[in-house]
Image: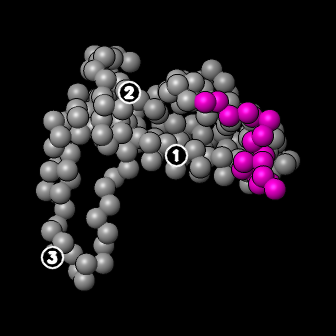
Amino acid sequence: MDDNKSESKVVGPSGRKIVYDKDGKPCRVCNTMLDFQFATGGTAGKVASSSKSPASEIPNGSYARIDPPDVEQLGRSSWTLLHSIAARYPEAPSTTQKQEIKQFMTIFSHIYPCNWCAKDFEEFIRNNAPRVDSREELGRWLCEAHNDVNKKLGKEEFNCNLWTKRWVDGWD
């Protein structure tokens, strides 16, 4: 990345490197909440609560005061969405379906809320074009993409031979 702060070696309490936005501020969705609070001097709660109405101003107290997702919640939710899409992808997709899923993956990589993660996924797609000729191909390609991220995060890789058990058929 060309942003010097993005290459910062500052490590947060989670052991992850702090990720900064293009504007040089710690990225809210690119870091864990703990790391974001560390990088902002512990003011995340103050910033978040100052932009929200006090509980007494919430009509009937009907709205839960849920903070925006951090990188972990966003990542889990995104991978769940992507794997679920692959699990429902046709066994024999039409030409239009193939074009649409490629376009979706490209657009997803451009609009993903964490700019660092988005650039990483864009690069993965450039180097490993989505395989879209069948559900099996797309599911395995997505599993490989997910494992690429798992490797970078020091997480255990998933056995892609089991992708249908996890996302299509269940474990019976």
- Label 3 crowd (10 A; few <14 / some 14-19 / many >=20): few
Q: Label 3 belongs to which residue?
A: 56
* Residue that extends furthest to the right in the rendered view of this protein: 92
Check the image and report above or below for 159 versus 11.
Answer: below
Q: Distance between the residues labelled 1 and 2?
A: 17 Å
Check the image and report above or below for 1 versus 171.
Answer: above
Residue 10, how many percent across, how many down? 28, 21
Q: Distance between the residues labelled 3 and 1?
A: 33 Å
Q: Is mark 3 on a helix, strand or loop?
A: helix
| Picture quadrant of residue 35 | top left
> Is residue 100 visible to the viewer in this orientation of the structure?
no
Q: Which of marks 2 and 3 is nearer the N terminus?
A: 2
Check the image and report above or below for 78 versus 24.
Answer: below
Say if the magenta span includes residue 119: no
**Quarter of the picture holding the C terminus:** bottom right
Q: Label 2 belongs to which residue?
A: 16
Q: Distance between the residues labelled 2 and 3?
A: 37 Å
Left/right of residue 26 with respect to residue 43 in the rendered view: right
Residue drawn at x 60%, y 40% as measured from the top left: 105
Q: Earlier in the sequence, mark 3 or mark 1?
A: 3
Q: Which amino acid does label 3 sit on?
A: Ser
Q: Earlier in the sequence, mark 1 or mark 2?
A: 2
Q: What residue type is labelled 1?
A: Arg
Say which mark, if any, is on residue 76.
Answer: 1
Residue drawn at x 15%, y 76% as measured from the top left: 56
Instruction: Judge by depth and name the residue closer to the eye, 120 or 93.
Output: 120
- Label 2 crowd (10 A; few <14 / some 14-19 / many >=20): some
Q: Depth-wise, is mark 1 or mark 2 nearer the camera?
A: 2
Left/right of residue 13 with respect to residue 117 in the rendered view: left
